[in-house]
Amino acid sequence: MVIDAHMHVFPDALAGKALPRMAEVAKVPYHTDGTLRDTQEKMTQWGIDKGLFLHIATRPGQHKVNDFAASIQNRHILCFGSVHPKDPDALAEMERIQALGLHGVKFHFDYQDVRMDDAAVKPLMDLAAQLGLPVTVHAGWDPYSPDHVHAPVKAIAATAKEFPRLKLIAAHMGGMMRWDEALEVLAGRENVWLDTAMAAVYCPPEKFRALLQKHGCERVLFGSDCPWDTATHELEYLRAAGLTVRQLEGITAGNISALLGLPGQ
Ligand SMILES: [Zn+2]
């Protein structure tokens, strides 16, 4: 059983446009055509049993992203919904995310063009903590917005500290291209999970190992960031990190199952 806890997919009508546009801005290749059908085929090829798909509301009022997420969920497809922090209905929409049966909320502050330490973000984190909805944030640098980091590691650490009941997943090992800072201020925090998304592409092996060691493997989640990398490549990288079988099993399935309260494997 392998669960990929960081994947992306788009509605068919959007995939053909969204993916090439994002790839062009970020100057990165992609490995599916962005549709659910192709992504599921790739999951089979890559040996991924379940995928957690993280959606992003890129503007206020974009609630249909959550309807789409709910419409594609099944035994193999799990989704986090999303709200835009500047959405006047963001709190109600977060409650709707839970009512729709989505498993958590994703923020990507670079795509949302809001800083994580913006005052609008706090009530959302507070509500997520109250609802028990895990939150994933894109952490650190992003090739989509290379000159402006909207979720610096320090802001993530401050949020985790302020909301100790919040289950906070800091994607990309806690801080893409900010490995030392992630190691210093985030690794080891109790209510923080790190996902491995894109580590194979961006994170040097010695930093990767140091982060795993300091944070502890129990709160690390395997993620590929598909379509931006293949699960095969990311799994290969993870498996070369010198972990025990038990640690690997946790990272590739057990930890996310426990976090989301998925039925027994
Ligand atoms: Zn991603």
Image: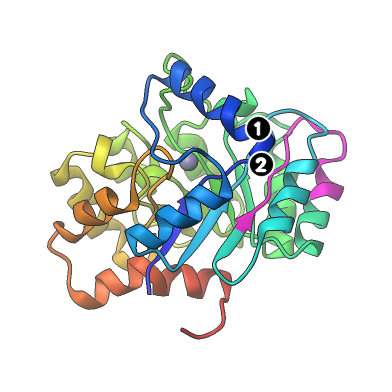
Quadrant location of the N terminus? bottom left
Foreground pick, 85 / 12? 12
Q: Is residue 193 visible?
A: no
Q: Quadrant of residue 142?
A: top left
Marks 1/2 in contact by CB < 8 Å: the verdict is yes
* Residue type highlighted by circle 2: Pro
The circle on residue 14 is 1
**Are there few (<14), some (14-19), or many (20+) residues within 10 Å of tag 2?**
some
| Residue sitting at x 59%, y 62% | 78
Report the predominant secondary structure element of the magenta stretch: loop
x, y (%) of residue 213?
Answer: 22, 59
Q: How is the image coloured?
A: rainbow
Q: Residue furthest top?
A: 147
Q: Quadrant of residue 88?
A: top right
Q: Residue furthest bottom?
A: 264
| Residue sitting at x 66%, y 62% | 73
Location of mark 2 (residue): 11
The response on whether ligand 1 sits within 8 Å of label 2 is no
| Residue sitting at x 12%, y 62% | 242
* Residue type highlighted by circle 1: Leu
Residue numbers of the magenta segment: 79-93
**Residue 73: in magenta span:** no
Q: Is residue 111 visible?
A: yes
x, y (%) of residue 49?
Answer: 43, 68
Of helix, strand and loop, which one carries label 2?
Answer: loop
Q: Is residue 40 left or right of residue 195?
A: right
x, y (%) of residue 100?
Answer: 79, 61
Q: Relative to residue 131, is residue 84 depicted above or below? A: above
